[in-house]
């Protein structure tokens, strides 16, 4: 591992390099309070004349001209949205001495040739591409959470820069003060173990993030893509707008309580360790079977989320829409008409409950 301390802007500006977000990473999810806190940190560090530590960036080579962001995608995405909003601001306020031009910002930080400097995961690609355009016309008024996070945050930044009293020179000085620890992983490094170690020390990842990365990180890119699109993306999509993956986290915890009778996680913080221990010590099936079973359970959990107690799920034969499980031999309940119609119409199966 090669570790260095450098400004965040220098990291982004590395020549002839694009950044990619592995497809199994969680979606861009910085909320308005987090964005406003970063905005305050930027201005505070500029006024105080000191640097501000913006975190650790884990990355590794991803082909000849790209780096994959193993950890730090939320920070780098937010930084690019900030720079994009600032480029828009400078385009509408030309001639300010001591600042780069909008074209310079774009060439240095936002674009690598004709392509964006950052390639986000497929779930965020459309919103991020739109955010890199001049989106000052997008406003939060009347939109609320309907806007994807990338567009919402770009709009928020544009709105803050449009307020009276905004000092572009102070802002840019603050952006230059953001520093990171950049850790480049080598072929000999266990990126999953390092990822877990860093996040155990305070980087806010949730159970679903850790489980997803644990299951998919070691696979080759083509297999990652297939497994993600076939199983994980539909599983997460069952819960719709799910801030912090709260419902997906609960689904994984409930599945673990049913599937692993000898294990119990006393808290959410223990769920991933129990899950990992089960996979490494007891589970004898394939990765694909495991993902299929998680998807099957998540379908039932999402449709019946109002019942929080695990015992409500013990008699469901959810293996009838997926793989065999420890509960597949238990008595079935009568299926409510609404649930029967849902599974028949959307999944093409007859649940026969």
Image: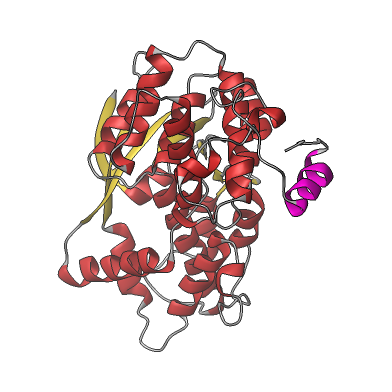
Q: Residue at x 77, y 49 (%)?
A: 342
Q: Is residue 272 visible?
A: yes
- Residue 34 lies, in percent from the top left, at 36, 63
- Total marks shown come to 0
Q: Nearer the viewer, residue 293 or 205?
A: 293
Does the magenta portion include 343?
yes
In the rendered image, the vertical position of residue 271 relative to residue 328, given as above or below: below
Above or below, 143 relative to 298: below
Q: Which residue extends farthest top?
A: 284
Task: Tell me if I can see residue 191 in this picture.
Answer: no
Q: Of all residues shown, which one is farthest toward the bottom?
A: 164
Q: Is residue 26 left or right of residue 186?
A: right
Residue 46, x across and y down, in percent: 23, 68
Magenta residues (range): 337-347
Q: Is residue 205 left or right of residue 88?
A: left
On-image quarter of the C terminus: top right
Q: Residue at x 20, y 72 (%)?
A: 47
Where residue 111 appears, x then y in whole percent? 57, 49
Percent coordinates x, y for residue 180 in the rendering: 28, 45
Taking the spot 34% from the left edge, 18% from the top edge, the residue there is 189
* 302 in magenta: no
């Amino acid at each position: 591992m090669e570790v260095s301390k450098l400004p965040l802007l220098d990291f982004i500006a590395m020549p002839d390099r694009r950044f990619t977000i592995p497809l199994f990473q969680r979606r861009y999810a910085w909320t308005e309070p987090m964005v406003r806190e970063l905005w305050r940190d930027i201005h505070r560090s500029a006024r105080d004349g000191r640097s501000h530590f913006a975190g650790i960036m884990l990355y590794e080579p991803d082909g000849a001209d790209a780096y994959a962001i193993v950890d730090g995608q939320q920070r780098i995405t937010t930084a690019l949205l900030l720079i994009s909003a600032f480029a828009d601001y400078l385009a509408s306020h030309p001639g300010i001495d001591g600042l780069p031009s909008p074209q310079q910002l774009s060439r240095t930080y936002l674009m690598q040739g004709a392509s964006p400097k950052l390639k986000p995961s497929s779930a965020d690609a459309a919103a991020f591409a739109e955010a890199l355009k001049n989106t000052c016309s997008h406003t939060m008024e009347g939109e609320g959470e309907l806007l994807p996070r990338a567009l919402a945050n770009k709009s928020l930044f544009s709105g803050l820069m449009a307020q009276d009293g905004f000092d572009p020179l102070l802002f840019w000085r603050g952006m230059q003060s953001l520093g990171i620890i950049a850790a480049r992983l080598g072929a000999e490094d266990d990126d999953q173990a390092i990822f877990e170690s860093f996040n155990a020390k305070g980087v806010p990842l949730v159970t679903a993030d850790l489980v997803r990365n644990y299951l998919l990180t070691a696979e080759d890119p083509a297999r990652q893509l297939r497994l993600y699109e076939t199983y994980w993306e539909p599983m997460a999509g069952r819960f719709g707008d799910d801030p912090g993956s709260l419902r997906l986290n609960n689904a994984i915890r409930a599945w673990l309580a049913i599937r692993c009778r000898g294990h119990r996680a006393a808290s959410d913080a223990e769920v991933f360790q129990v899950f990992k221990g089960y996979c490494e010590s007891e589970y004898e099936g394939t990765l694909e079977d495991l993902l299929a079973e998680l998807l099957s359970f998540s379908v039932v959990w999402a449709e019946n989320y109002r019942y929080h107690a695990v015992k409500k799920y013990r008699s469901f034969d959810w293996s009838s829409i997926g793989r065999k499980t420890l509960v597949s031999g238990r008595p079935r309940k009568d299926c409510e008409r609404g649930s029967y119609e849902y599974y028949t119409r959307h999944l093409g199966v007859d649940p026969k409950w």
